[in-house]
Image (tube, rainbow, N blue to C red):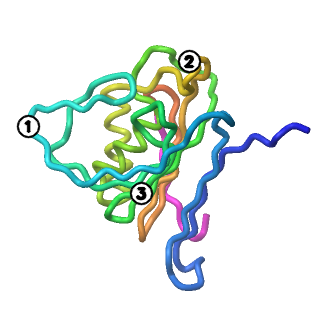
Amino acid sequence: MTSPVSCDTFVALPPATADGCVVFGKNSDRPDDEVQEVVYFPAADHDAGSKVQCTYIEIEQVGHTHAVMLSRPSWLWGAEMGSNEHGVCIGNEAVWTKVTSPREEKLLGMDLVRLGLERGSTAKQALDAVTELLRLHGQGGACAEDGFMTYHNSFLICDGREAWVLETSSEFWAAEKCTSNA
């Protein structure tokens, strides 16, 4: 029997929830033998001009990063999903487009999840951080420890008031704000 392969992310915003809370969830289709860690990184202040080493590349660090709780494959810097101290949640999913997924080592979609959470105190700020990092650095590189799989990314980004779907292909992107009418 073949195991189903699915990677889905969802959010329910008020008034869709009975008690007015936000419900965010994600399942994963990562390799069966890949270790997933749940990790916490506290908020931190960083020196001007400092750098941060992501999975494959080093980029400019911001002056302050928010505290984050992440679910991530143990071999990489980023995360598949997580939340920050301000209630921002992000999850990513693999997507394939007509644009060839770059094997060149750049930012992984999972790096962008962590960077968006560390840099955004609202869903919109996290979206802006991710799209600016795509513009500056692009995305690419092996998305699995075996070095075989590459893909583009789709993201669901939410906070207590709004949610955004962000679709990417290489450095190109499109975003749409989700509403209760969607």
> Is there CB contact under 8 Å for labels 3 and 2?
no
Residue 43, quarter of the rendered image: bottom left
Q: CA distance from mark 3 to mark 2?
A: 27 Å
Viewer-proximal residue among 20 and 55: 55
Residue 155 shows in the view: no
Camera-side mark, 2 or 1: 2
Q: CA distance from mark 3 to mark 1?
A: 25 Å
Query: Does 7 sit left or right of 151 as displayed?
Result: right
- Which region of the structure is painted magenta? 173-182
**Which residue lies under the disc numbered 2?**
147
What SS does tag 2 mark?
Answer: loop
Query: Does 114 sit left or right of 174 as displayed?
Result: left
Residue 110: percent from left, percent from top: 46, 37
**Which residue lies under the disc numbered 1?**
48
- Three-letter code, disc 2: Gly
Residue 169: percent from left, percent from top: 52, 29
**Which residue lies under the disc numbered 3?**
83
The quarter of the picture where the C terminus appears is bottom right
Q: Residue at x 39, y 28 (%)?
A: 55
N-term-proximal mark, 3 vs 1: 1
Residue projecting furthest to the left:
48
Query: Does 63 sit left or right of 179 as displayed?
Result: left
- Three-letter code, disc 1: Ala
- How many C-alpha atoms fall within 10 Å of the one at disc 1: few (<14), some, or many (≥20)? few
Residue 38: percent from left, percent from top: 47, 50
Q: Is residue 112 magenta?
A: no
- How many C-alpha atoms fall within 10 Å of the one at disc 2: few (<14), some, or many (≥20)? few
- Three-letter code, disc 3: Ser
Q: Is residue 179 magenta?
A: yes
